[in-house]
Image (cartoon, helix red, strand yellow):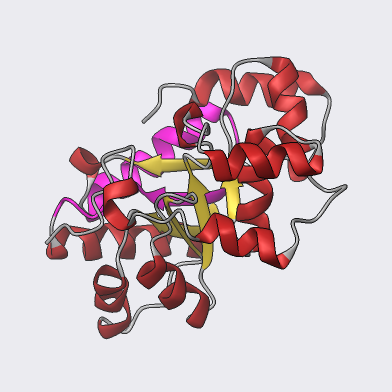
Amino acid sequence: MYRNETPVGKAVRESGVPREQVFVTSKIYDPEHGYDSTLKAVQDSLNKFGFDYLDLYLIHSPLSGKAKRLETYKALLQAKKEGKLKSIGVSNYSPKHIEEIREAGLELPAVNQVELHPFCQQKPIVEYCQANNILVQAYTPLVRGKLDDPVITSTASKYGKTTAQIAIRWSLQHGFVPLPKSANPERVVANAQVFDFEIAEEDMKKLDTLDKGKAGAVTWNPVDAE
């Protein structure tokens, strides 16, 4: 859906890194929801990547409604059974949306990818996912660069780190998988340099106080879709 499957596949092949050492994720966009259309979308993704399988495939959002959500999910389960997908997951799903999957007698998703950062902590979703062994991926962990809050800047100064590194480390220490995004090679490297320190509990608690609930979201955050 981001029109980058072909170049990503090419980059992986040209990198010299074995395919099994690269974790590749893609998504199905809302207009493609439905059983047959989802099976087609998965195959189209594989063709564009030039791969035999994908490591993770996500339903991008719950906006298509309950019936189509479930048909889409069933199709992903079928693609997984056929070996085309290693894992399947959802994105922007609330506990209600995931409970629909459980009530249909289907296995729960491996992943739920939601907007998640100190200002939008999605606590009900996080608590539900952690209680049900669903990995939480945090998109927009850098709040689109809006990290000039005094609590974050003072924490960065204390640890000798960038504000982005503090935001990423906060996410990791909560057990999330943050997905920082940057087109700057130096920042990409810096964003990965977060394993040589740990934020103290007292500082984590200060960062936790920044939560504004849904008002803190900086993207569309469609978790309340019917």
Quarter occupied by residue 202 = bottom right
Q: Position of residue 93 (x, y in %)?
A: 31, 60
The answer to whether any part of residue 181 appears in the image is yes
153 lies left or right of 57: right
Magenta extent: 35-64
Question: Residue at position x 11%, y 62% from top?
Answer: 226
Q: Residue at x 40, y 33 (%)?
A: 44
Horizontal side, residue 82 vs residue 106: left or right: right
Q: Is residue 18 magenta?
A: no
The quarter of the image holding the N terminus is: top left
Residue that protrudes farthest toward the right in the picture: 196
Vertical placement of 207 versus 201: above or below? above
- Tell me if residue 108 comes above or below residue 62 in the rendering: below
Look at the image and say whether residue 53 sits in the magenta stretch.
Answer: yes
User: Looking at the image, which is closer to me, 154 or 135?
Assistant: 154
Q: Is residue 37 left or right of residue 119?
A: left
Q: Nearer the viewer, residue 77 or 213?
A: 213
Q: Measuring from the top left, give residue 68's x and y in whole percent.
A: 17, 58
Where residue 47 appears, as percent x and y from the top left, is: 49, 30
Q: In this view of the protein, can residue 82 be seen by the observer?
A: no
Question: Does residue 162 appear to the left or right of 127 in the view shown?
Answer: right
In percent of width and height, residue 198 lies at 80, 56
Residue 7: quadrant of the picture: top right
Quarter of the image where one finds residue 3: top left
Residue at position x 55%, y 29% in the image: 49
Q: Is residue 138 above or below residue 183?
A: below
Foreground pick, 64 / 134: 134
Q: Tell me how many marks there are.
A: 0
User: Relative to residue 81, is residue 190 depicted above or below?
Assistant: above
